[in-house]
Image: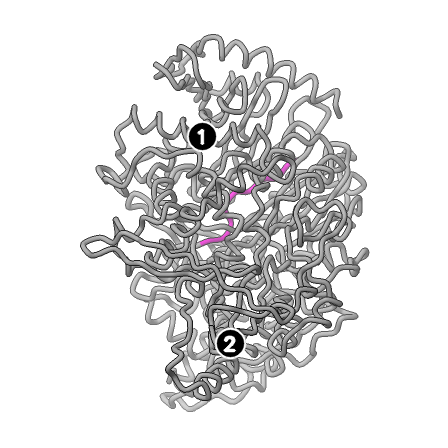
Amino acid sequence: MRGRAGRCGAAVVSAALQFLAAAFPAPGSATAVASGHGGMSAVIRYTEYGIPHIVARDHAGLGFGSGWAQARDHVCALADAFLTVRGERSRWFGPDPAPDPQGSFASSNLASDLYYRGVRDAGTVEQLRAIPAPAGPSRAVTDLGRGWAAGYNAWLRRNLVTDPACAGADWVGPVTDIDVSALDHSLAVLLGQGRGINGITAARPPDLAGDPAVQEAEAAHAFAPAVPALRGTTGRPLTARPADPGSNAVAFHGSTTNNGRGLLLGNPHFPWHGTHRFWQSQQTIPGELNVMGASLLNTTNVSIGYNADIAWSHTVATGVPMNLYELTLDPADPTAYLVDGHPERMTPRTVTVPVKDSAPVTRTQWWTRWGPVLTTLDTTGPLPWTRTTAYALNDPNAANPRGPDTSLALSRAHSTDEALTALNRTQGLAWANTVAADAAGHTLFAQSQVLPHITDDLDRRCSTPLGAALYPATGLAVLDGSRSHCSPGTDPHALQPGIFGPGALPTLQDTPYVENSNDSAWLTNTDHPLTKYERVFGTIGAPRSLRTRGALHDVSALAAQGHLRVQDLQHHQFADHSPAGDLAATGLAAACRAPAKDPGEEGDGVGDTAASIAEACRVLANWDRTVNTDSRGAPLFDRFWRRLTAEARPEELWTVPFSPADPLHTPRGLNPASPAVPRALEGAVADLRAAGLAPDARWSQAQFVVRAGARIPIPGGTAELGVWNVIEALWDPAGGGYHDVQSGTSYLQAVGWNDGPCPEAKTLLAYSQSSDATSPHHADRTALYATGQWVSPPFCENDIRHSPELQVVTVAERD
């Protein structure tokens, strides 16, 4: 394996150093726009579909080239993200509009600004950057960030912004490396403090003049709706919005492949708009780093990718990266709380936010030894601050600056063993699993998350009544903040206090396959279940999502089939089969055979005719149970299934309940006697009629995007259908169906190896490389996605240099 890396690496070193000495044009190329005389510099070689291959002498230069190239493709989205972490959204856009829901849980610009300006005023990012490695960032990572900011600024100085989203806007301007680190921090806390932004910024001490009995009664009542709602999320990540990130990934061992080498298919489901899009590139420092893949916008390294020897992907994990503390307050002062009988005063953090066309807004946040006080946590409902009780949020990722080092270490790995060592050494992933395969045929699954050290035993000893309901159902612990011994523990080899060390993390190596679709680690491989982990990591013996069930059925069958190739991964990605269709088919057919209403008789709540229902039944009977673009009946079943699962309780929906002994086949058997079935069918027919669609409409007629006036059909469907190729879109009858994809399949990579020096990789960025509507690479790969086509991006030096669309650009800090 190292031999292959050495052969490919030597060619890269030789050619890349020539490029760095002088950017020479290849035949037919468009040559450089900026030449340097010292300072940071990089060579960017663009190939098909606008993919940049960035070469630099060092990490600062590599960051410079990446910042430049990202600005070229996404300057408006990047500038918007910097406004967020600077707390300046209200200044430019007003306090009331909500930030991009794809990237923030804040309900308004003002709430977002109060939180992020508070982080900025407290010097949080500077303090994290000052922590010595390995607990803090490495020199390589700080150099990458410094270079990225300089590259972004250089692009702005030398180019006119033409993207209609921000052309001529005063809020687009230069940034600092602190801004870049602030974006890393916002990503780390996304599913921790990020979920609590509204509650953190709205928290106010109670009015001491009010009636305490009334306050306590209101507090008790406030919890009533929260607990059942959270119980409904059992076995799933603590997320609630359709656009929340998710993913699939599978790695196949060499024992299942045609040549004994590994295979990996990565399919992250991330937003199609805004600052959490992926962006594809190759990053090379000759002799030190050579990796290709996708970065989340405004990050400096490849997040998901491959090199000559290994490929990896991430999936959003079920581990809950936070916990709550219930504070017992000083009866005389609601801004003081008791710990071991002694009062501790909360720390006020007063924040002032500039507001467009209005006076600045000043608010005070309240912080404790456990974290900020908050009055709501996204989906939990109210967490009232009364005279006697308040709640504080503990998020260990607020003190974790190591995410970029984890990505860089994975990029440098040459085997799954080295990848696991990298995860254990850097301990930087806030909310993701890692799935990997290597050229020697090995596989890896690791839930190497930074989680609060909440053991089941600690929860038993320290849980409050609210926590007793929430922790088993969701993994969110609510601990007694009045006892110091209820602090999270710390494992040996943990890089920061209060988190789990590598020895406690669910890990599986060298099984025929490892697969994850955002369920817990339990059934990563059905023949090798993982069971020795705490509840905070996820469930054991609980129902799996339809997407997990379908994926494990297909993946285990592929592994048993053997002789797998990259082409098998490509086919699996776009099979677009719906497990929900299989599960519902028999029960739906039985419901359709039930006596029909008289023509013209109104149904329950919707009022469709018996003739329309009969037609719908005929269409569904002939539906091929896929959401391919040419699938007739897919829109009808999609609307039926969404309505049915939203209305029917699980015990009403299925005739066979879940069994831990048969998790892939239970629950099953759609109950035709449920009154929700005919109501959902009638509602689905009405939905299609409102959108101008016939019952037998093709999926391409109902789900599409419009780019440059052209309508592009989009395959795949909602995760609730169990489809691997997830697409989450908003239903808009006036717009003809699903015409605005919110999130889902984003960066695809199917990677294997043969006996040559280059990995065999097929990739696809579903929404294309650039968010700039005027770019030639705004929709070119989206058109490929519509028909299930892939890109074969050049990786090795000879292939890059012979690309028919090669363009060479040298960028430098100084002219």
The crowding category of the residue bearing disc 2, from other C-alpha atoms within 10 Å (few below 14, some 14 to 19, many at least 20), is many
Quarter of the image where one finds residue 664? bottom right
Q: Considering depth in this image, is 328 or 479 the residue closer to the camera?
A: 328
Q: Which residues are magenta?
A: 743-751
* Residue visible at 73% across and 33% down in the picture: 415
Asked if the magenta segment contains residue 186, the reply would be no
Q: Main secondary structure of the magenta part?
A: strand
Amino acid type, label 2: Leu
Between the C-alphas of marks 1 and 2, the distance is 48 Å
**Height in image: 277 above or below 177?**
below
| Residue name at image x 60 percent, y 72 percent | 585
Can residue 27 be seen from the camera position used here?
yes
Q: Residue furthest left?
A: 357
Q: Measured from the top left, where is residue 73 in percent x and y?
A: 38, 34
Which residue was labeled with disc 2? 644
> Which residue type carries mark 1?
Trp
Tell me, yes or no, whether the highlighted magenta stretch contains residue 749: yes
Q: Front-most of 287 and 170?
A: 170
Mark closer to the chain start, 1 or 2: 1
As drawn, the label of residue 148 is 1
Select label 1 or label 2 by which is in front. Answer: 1
